[in-house]
Amino acid sequence: MRKGERSTLNAQRSTPNGGKLLAWLLVGFAVCLWGRAEEVGKERASVIVAVGAAGEEQYGETFSKWAANWQKAAASGDARIATIGVGAEEKENVARLKQALEAEPKETSVPLWLVLLGHGSFDGREGKFNLRGDDIAASELAKWLATFRRPVVVICGFSASGAFLKPLSAPDRVVIVATKSGAENNFARFGGHISEAIADPAADLDKDGQTSVLEAWLSAAQRVADFYKAEERLATEHSLLDDNGDGLGTPADWFSGVRLVKRSADQRAPDGLRAHQLHLVPSAAERALPATVRAERDKLERELSALRDAKASMSEDDYYHKLEELMLRLGRLYREGKPRDGS
């Protein structure tokens, strides 16, 4: 029996027949207030999409289309979205981007998505994203993001964006760049493909009903590779993903499905796990989990992954003891976070 049903039943038992209607009205009013409080207190992810200077009219139309894909995805994921650089009236965008970031909560469990679409440049020392008006340098953007203590996803869908990877890398942050270095400075198609993949069910590789950042990136990188192959052209963009904070990044061809099958020679912590925990359009089951439960679940899953990586250096008894402990904690978390049905 649901909690609300028990309250109503108790009201019926203790109220004279003439007062039953009042009891029902009071219960209904309380449920209404509870629902509104839940909605007011609900935390929502934020998406900031900055569209850079087009340079040529054809690019302006292309970048606007990519931005529209993100707007649709954000709406599907019930995320707040702000777009910068869309519309002929917009001239100076650096200040607007800074203001949008300053307005965001710095400490919360829900993610901030920062999507940069357009052209970039690299002078051999510093990478820049070409906004209308002044450009934004990688070092400057890194300063703006340094105050955030929440999950952040930065998607650099522009040429020469590989120069942004190391400056923007940080703990609990996913950084995706369209190119492996600042030297890959031709027009990058990656930004368009990931804008299509982020909410595409076909990109859901593990079939859990939602497309993670990792899955969207893998799908987009494959679509880029397929384009150059079909056109019989030398690929001029090679995307990288970093989510372990080391600023080095991992290429898409190191993965089979969502599993990392190739490791670096120095055996550093692998990329991909954190990115696979973040979804712009969550499944119904994911939405049902309270934000605090989801954050703790993600933390335990990362601990579980680290334990598996360390298995070879542990005794069998020690490994399975710690594995059991983590699995029990996960089980309790899911049980406590499961929506109550009153039974």
Image (cartoon, rainbow, N blue to C red):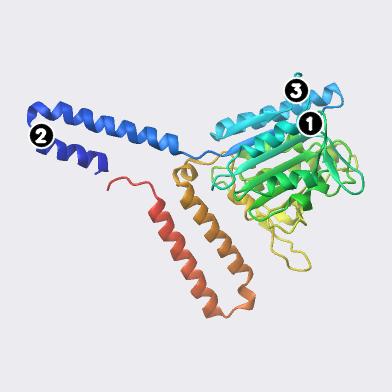
Residue type beneath disc 2: Thr
Question: Residue 58, image x and y in percent?
Answer: 83, 23
Per the image, label 3 sits on a secondary structure element best described as loop
Mark 2 and mark 3 lie on one chain; the one further toward the N terminus is 2
The quarter of the picture where residue 138 lies is top right
- Point 47% across, 69% down: residue: 325
State the image coordinates of residue 28 (x, y, percent, origin top left).
26, 30
Residue 15: give its label: 2
Name the residue: 33% across, 32% down: 33
Label 3 packing within 10 angstroms: few (<14), some (14-19), many (20+):
few
Query: Disc 3 designates what residue?
Result: 90
Q: Residues within 10 Å of mark 2 (few under 14, many from 20)?
A: few
Q: Are marks 2 and 3 in contact (CB under 8 Å)?
A: no
Q: Nearer the viewer, mark 1 or mark 3?
A: 3
Residue located 63% across and 48% down the image: 148
Disc 1 target residue: 52
Which of the two discs, 1 and 2, labels the residue nearer the N terminus?
Answer: 2
Question: Quick one: SS at disc 2?
Answer: loop
Which residue is rendered at x = 90% and y = 46% of the image?
183
